[in-house]
Amino acid sequence: MRHERTKENNNSCFAQMPQLKMFSGILKEETGVAFIESSRNERYFECHPIWSGYLRHFTGREVQARLLPQRDYETGKQILIIWPKEAESKEPFFELYYNERLIKYPASTLGHIALNINGAVYNFSHLINENEVMQPEEYLYRPAMGEFAPHPLTGRFDVSDPQKPYFDKFGRNFMRTIHVARVTGADIEKLRAHCDAELLRIYRAPKDPKRPHKYSEFNFFTRSCTTIIRDALRAIGFKDIKGIIPRDMFISASTVFAEAEKIGAVQCRFFVKPQLLVPEAPPSARSWVLNPRNLFRVRRHRRLFGY
């Protein structure tokens, strides 16, 4: 779900999202019929298409689900999004995401950076419609159905039919492995306000009539997914974070976070969300370390993440 544009007040973009009806229970499949069974033995979505990727990875697990406004091209029904139930954080946090590169897209060679602030995932891009803030489940677990799916013949992005565009933009954790640096104890409200202001600036930027779908002020060196998030983190005190390349910046940031934890400024956790493999996406790969300085940090970085 894309967020509503921020108004002149300072309310968070994420706070303006409507409340959505949630369902929870165990994802099951019996005699070819998939459904979610609640603790009261109620069956939800027996007559609704459930993506095979969910059945592959989440069958038998406790999940949450809700309907998206987008519709499946084959059935015309609203698309159902399902994600594993996880404990909610009891304290403010942010998670820095390094998304590995997508093998089938040259534009993804360097990977991607995103930022989850208290359950609001901020994503910045050279495409105007990908500058957005989403519920974490949408960022991580959207199904490869309808507009989110790759084209059924080419397996890639294809918008040749405007009535049935295939954006190949389903759940990022099904598309690639995601490396996560989770931090608590930082100035979360200031970080969120900074990112909201960045989105507002992007929406207000003058449009290029020759490329209206592109963010006109995008600049690889100063206004990219990596540098916007890097500068947001610098603004809340992590001033030593450097880098314009996603993986290089992520290594730098993880190092800075670990040093801040040593002096008791923040608390950190470093982990990997392995790719949930599905036929729609080949295995992802880490992009290369391009900054020579980070070559010396890689060994410590690997210890932090356990690989």
Image: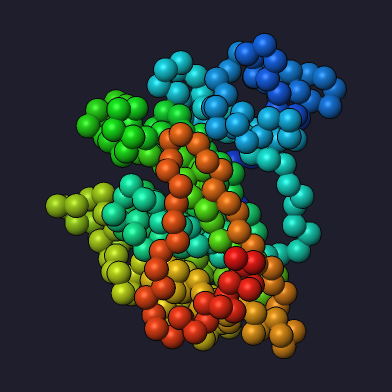
Looking at the rendering, in which quadrant would you find the C terminus? Answer: bottom right
Q: Residue at horizontal 64%, vertical 62%?
A: 271
Q: Residue at horizontal 36%, vertical 50%?
A: 103
Residue 299 spot, x, y in % from top left: 56, 78
Q: Say above or below: 139 vs 27.
A: below
Residue 297 spot, x, y in % from top left: 52, 81
Asked whether, in this view, residue 86 is left or right of residue 253, the answer is right
Q: Say above or below: 170 vs 236.
A: above
Of residues 274 and 157, the one drawn nearer to the viewer in this rendering: 274
Asked whether, in this view, residue 118 is left or right of residue 73, the answer is right
> In the displayed image of the protein, which residue is found farthest to the left?
210
Residue 117 spot, x, y in % from top left: 60, 61
Asked whether, in this view, residue 149 is left or right of residue 83, the answer is left
How was this image coloured? Answer: rainbow
Q: Is residue 105 visible?
A: yes
Question: Which image quarter: residue 74?
Answer: top left
